[in-house]
Amino acid sequence: MTSAVPSRRYAKGDAKRAEILSAALAVIGERGYRHSSLQEIADAVGLTKAGVLHYFDSREDLLVEVLRERDDADEARLLPDDGDIIDLLPRALRHNAEVPGLVQLYSRLVVESEAAEHPGHAYIDDRYAQIETTLGEAARARQEAGEIRIDLDPAMIARILTAVSDGIQLQWLHDPAIDMSGTFETVLGLLTPPPSGPTADS
């Protein structure tokens, strides 16, 4: 008979790892990326810094996993019932205005992970690929419904919307008065066909 001890140990480890990620999300979201530390995260879960890093390969790996956790939470909380990711983005931008530390973390990781050896490189590559694929599918569906100009390539629309989303967050970090979701929705309006313009049925 196989002992249940190892499975209980793994379950306990998974639970602690999830607790660390939750604490890191809260600390970074509240205090900001530059003003939060690994020690604060460790204190929040009753561990030493070394204890935290027992569950992650490095501090950078922890930060990447924090962003993965944020992505999953945003999708679960903010994705519309119809699954349209285009509508998810302005909702996410409104939410991000409440957690500037996570915006700082994401923006910094995008820049730093340009190097292939960076722990976040694969995460950013995969994230851009997934977002642009799903945005492209959503854009195509809106074109078929006559809601977006059909003379535009859905893949190009996806790249533009991704660039607007990331770019407006960078500007917002410098000027928090910027209306991120309003800017994004203005760009969406520019993609809408005029009343006499081409539609998917024409």
Image (cartoon, rainbow, N blue to C red):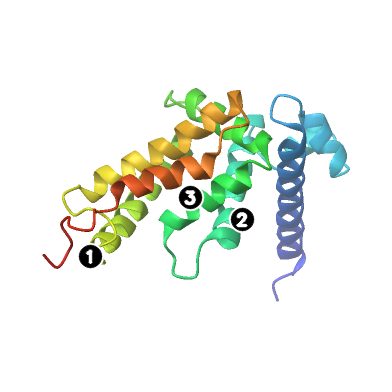
> What x and y, as percent, mark residue 84?
42, 62
> What x and y, as percent, mark residue 170?
52, 28
Name which residue type carries label 2.
Ala
**Which residue is the site of mark 3?**
89
Name which residue type carries label 1.
Glu
Q: Residues within 10 Å of mark 2 (few under 14, many from 20)?
A: few
Q: Left or right of 19: which side holds 162? A: left
Residue sitting at 77 percent across and 45 percent down?
A: 23
> What x and y, as percent, mark residue 193?
24, 54
Residues at discs 2 and 1 in contact (Cβ within 8 Å) = no
**Which residue is the site of mark 1?**
144
Q: Visible in this render: residue 45?
A: yes
Say whether disc 2 or disc 1 marks the residue closer to the N-terminus. 2
Q: Left or right of 59: which side holds 122? A: left
Question: What is the CA distance from the residue labelled 2 to the residue labelled 3?
Answer: 14 Å
Say whether disc 2 or disc 3 marks the residue closer to the N-terminus. 2
Question: What is the CA distance from the residue labelled 2 to the residue labelled 1?
Answer: 30 Å
**Which residue is the site of mark 2?**
73
Q: What is the quadrant of the C terminus in the image?
A: bottom left
Closest to the observer, 24 or 196: 196
